[in-house]
Amino acid sequence: MRAIERAVRAEVRKMPEDVRGLALAEAAIALARRLDDDPSDSAAALLNRELRMTLADLYRKAPEDVTDDVDRFLARIATADVRHAAD
Protein backbone atom coordinates (compact mmCIF):
# COMPACT_ATOMS: atom_id res chain seq x y z
CA MET A 1 0.00 0.00 0.00
CA ARG A 2 1.41 3.36 -0.99
CA ALA A 3 0.98 6.89 0.32
CA ILE A 4 -2.27 8.04 -1.29
CA GLU A 5 -4.10 4.78 -0.68
CA ARG A 6 -2.87 4.75 2.92
CA ALA A 7 -4.09 8.33 3.44
CA VAL A 8 -7.51 7.62 1.91
CA ARG A 9 -7.91 4.46 3.99
CA ALA A 10 -7.09 6.47 7.13
CA GLU A 11 -9.65 9.09 6.11
CA VAL A 12 -12.32 6.46 5.47
CA ARG A 13 -11.58 4.78 8.82
CA LYS A 14 -12.48 8.06 10.58
CA MET A 15 -15.97 7.97 9.04
CA PRO A 16 -18.97 6.30 10.69
CA GLU A 17 -19.28 2.55 10.11
CA ASP A 18 -22.36 2.79 7.89
CA VAL A 19 -20.48 5.15 5.55
CA ARG A 20 -17.30 3.05 5.57
CA GLY A 21 -19.28 0.11 4.21
CA LEU A 22 -20.58 1.95 1.15
CA ALA A 23 -19.38 1.08 -2.34
CA LEU A 24 -18.42 4.76 -2.60
CA ALA A 25 -15.76 4.20 0.09
CA GLU A 26 -14.32 1.33 -1.95
CA ALA A 27 -14.37 3.55 -5.04
CA ALA A 28 -12.35 6.19 -3.17
CA ILE A 29 -9.75 3.56 -2.26
CA ALA A 30 -9.62 2.32 -5.87
CA LEU A 31 -9.09 5.89 -7.12
CA ALA A 32 -6.28 6.33 -4.59
CA ARG A 33 -4.65 3.12 -5.81
CA ARG A 34 -4.75 4.41 -9.38
CA LEU A 35 -3.16 7.70 -8.27
CA ASP A 36 -0.39 5.73 -6.54
CA ASP A 37 0.37 4.04 -9.88
CA ASP A 38 1.88 7.31 -11.16
CA PRO A 39 -0.58 8.19 -13.95
CA SER A 40 0.07 10.82 -16.61
CA ASP A 41 -0.51 14.44 -15.61
CA SER A 42 -3.90 14.68 -17.29
CA ALA A 43 -5.05 11.36 -15.80
CA ALA A 44 -3.78 12.41 -12.37
CA ALA A 45 -5.77 15.64 -12.56
CA LEU A 46 -8.95 13.73 -13.41
CA LEU A 47 -8.33 11.10 -10.74
CA ASN A 48 -7.65 13.78 -8.11
CA ARG A 49 -10.90 15.54 -8.98
CA GLU A 50 -12.87 12.30 -8.81
CA LEU A 51 -11.25 11.35 -5.50
CA ARG A 52 -12.03 14.77 -4.02
CA MET A 53 -15.65 14.54 -5.16
CA THR A 54 -16.00 10.96 -3.90
CA LEU A 55 -14.66 11.85 -0.46
CA ALA A 56 -16.96 14.89 -0.34
CA ASP A 57 -19.92 12.64 -1.17
CA LEU A 58 -18.92 10.27 1.60
CA TYR A 59 -18.74 13.12 4.11
CA ARG A 60 -22.17 14.33 3.00
CA LYS A 61 -23.58 10.86 3.67
CA ALA A 62 -22.12 10.79 7.18
CA PRO A 63 -24.58 11.89 9.86
CA GLU A 64 -23.80 15.17 11.54
CA ASP A 65 -22.19 14.98 14.94
CA VAL A 66 -25.02 15.71 17.36
CA THR A 67 -22.64 16.66 20.16
CA ASP A 68 -21.63 19.80 18.27
CA ASP A 69 -25.26 20.97 18.26
CA VAL A 70 -25.64 20.13 21.95
CA ASP A 71 -22.45 22.00 22.83
CA ARG A 72 -23.62 25.09 20.90
CA PHE A 73 -27.01 24.95 22.61
CA LEU A 74 -25.45 24.65 26.08
CA ALA A 75 -23.09 27.53 25.35
CA ARG A 76 -26.04 29.73 24.35
CA ILE A 77 -27.93 28.84 27.53
CA ALA A 78 -24.90 29.55 29.72
CA THR A 79 -24.39 32.92 28.01
CA ALA A 80 -28.06 33.83 28.45
CA ASP A 81 -27.95 32.94 32.16
CA VAL A 82 -24.91 35.16 32.71
CA ARG A 83 -26.64 38.10 31.00
CA HIS A 84 -29.78 37.70 33.13
CA ALA A 85 -27.79 37.38 36.35
CA ALA A 86 -26.06 40.70 35.64
CA ASP A 87 -29.42 42.52 35.34
Image (tube, rainbow, N blue to C red):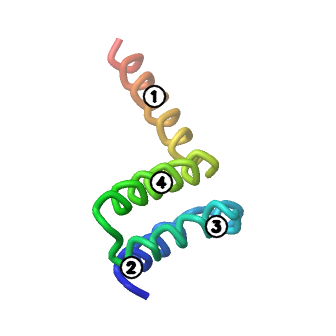
Q: Which residue is mark 4?
A: 50
* Residues at marks 3 and 2 touching, judged by CB atoms closer than 8 Å: no
* SS at badge 1: helix
Give how far across and how far down residue 26 sits, in percent. 62, 69
Whichever of callouts 1 and 3 sits on the residue coming sooner in the sequence is 3
Specify the quadrant of the image occupied by residue 45. Answer: bottom left
Is tag 1's residue or tag 2's residue first in the polypeptide sequence? 2
Above or below residue 60? Residue 5 is below
Q: Residue 84: horizontal and vertical position, in percent?
A: 41, 16
What residue is shown with label 1? 76
Q: Are marks 4 and 3 in contact (CB under 8 Å)?
A: no
Q: Residues within 10 Å of mark 2 (few under 14, many from 20)?
A: few
Discs 4/3, front: 4
Disc 3: which residue: 20
- Amino acid type shown at disc 4: Glu
Q: Secondary structure at mark 3?
A: helix
Q: Which mark is residue 37?
A: 2
Of mark 4 and mark 2, the one earlier in the sequence is: 2
Count of all numbered marks drawn on residues in the image: 4
- Residue at x 33% of width, y 17% of height: 86
Q: In front of the other: label 1 or label 4? A: 4
For marks 1 and 3, give the CA distance. Answer: 34 Å
Residue 37 placement, left or right of 62: left
Give the amino acid at mark 3: Arg
Query: Which of the 4 image quarters holds residue 64?
Result: top right
Q: Residue at x 39, y 71 (%)?
A: 35
Is residue 85 shown above or below 1?
above
